[in-house]
Image (spheres, grey):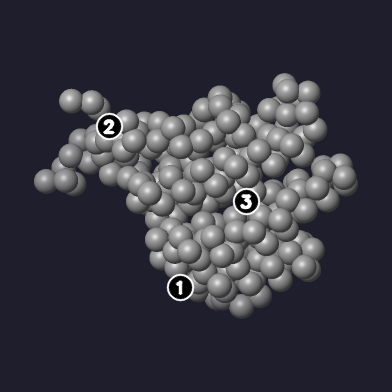
Amino acid sequence: MQKNHNIPTPGPIPRHVVIIMDGNGRWARRKNLDRLIGHREGIKSARSVVRTAREIGIEYLTLYAFSAQNWKRPGEEVLALMDLLREYLSNEGEKLLAQNTRLNAIGNLSNLPQDIRELLGRVMKMTEECNSLTITLALSYGGREEIINAVNSIIAEGEKKPVSEKDFQEYLYTSGLPEPDLLIRTGGEMRLSNFLLWQLAYAEIYVTKTLWPNFRRRHLLKAIANYRNRERRFGLTGEQIREKGR
């Protein structure tokens, strides 16, 4: 009987997968192409990953689309990236709605151009009742900035009592989202790049040398299969995990 390679086995599917989409520039450089073409090809990867995530039962998918530090890139590249984001939001709303997929966004969204903020708001409103998959775009996002923002919000509210982890999480951009189960980083770099520093405390990490514009369905399925063969510990020893499961 022919083996089915489409659905990874044997453990549970991660509920929340986050991806650092790295390698667009290197992909373009290796092909002697403009960096913008690498970013545009990366959108094709995002569409493939979103489709696959929905098919295999992932509930939440968070994509690191534009960091707070990316504003320091050359102005021409930043403008081109904003144009791509504008194009994506203009074209994807109806598709996401048809696929019962909700769009969410995190980060310092006030830094985005006003028309993009309005577009983003419209697509988020349009898809807010969708429940097959929630895609979260991290835009103008920085992990340290998020934590500082949370601390300042708590101070501004005049909290006098000790703040628990649960309390603190309510002030993060990701309030309402489950903690990530799996972080995927493409492009082979072994760093977090200021992404979800609080939330990734117990996430499994998977790094692939595949550049983001080359990352498609089979690469995601390989990452999920790797995750499903791991034993998640959450700070516990193997013996404690086995004892907990009895």
Question: Nearer the N terminus, badge 3 or badge 1?
Answer: 1
* Residue type, numbered disc 2: Asn
Q: Position of residue 183 (x, y in %)?
A: 48, 41
- Residue 205 lies, with reference to residue 111, above or below; the image says above
Residue name at image x 43 percent, y 47 percent: 53
Q: Determine if residue 198 is in view.
A: no
* Residue type, numbered disc 3: Gly
Few, some or many residues within 10 Å of mark 1 (<14, 14–19, 20+)? few
The answer to whether marks 3 and 2 mark residues whose Cβ atoms lie closer than 8 Å is: no
Q: Element at badge 3?
A: helix
Q: Which of marks 3 and 2 is in front?
A: 2
Question: Nearer the N terminus, badge 3 or badge 2?
Answer: 2
Q: Nearer the viewer, mark 3 or mark 1?
A: 1
Does residue 114 appear to the left or right of 162 in the view shown? right
Q: Where is residue 40 in the image (x, y as percent from the top left)?
A: 69, 42
Residue name at image x 54 percent, y 33 percent: 215
Few, some or many residues within 10 Å of mark 2 (<14, 14–19, 20+)? few
Mark linked to residue 129: 1
* Residue type, numbered disc 1: Glu
Q: Where is residue 25 in the image (x, y as percent from the top left)?
A: 73, 32
Few, some or many residues within 10 Å of mark 3 (<14, 14–19, 20+)? many
CA distance separating discs 3 and 2: 39 Å
Location of the N terminus by quadrant is: top left
Farthest bottom residue in view: 158
Residue at image mark 3: 143
Residue at image mark 2: 4
- Snapshot quadrant of residue 90: bottom right
- Residue 199 lies, with reference to residue 204, above or below; the image says below
Q: Which of 2 and 36 is in front in this view?
A: 2
Q: Nearer the viewer, mark 2 or mark 1?
A: 2
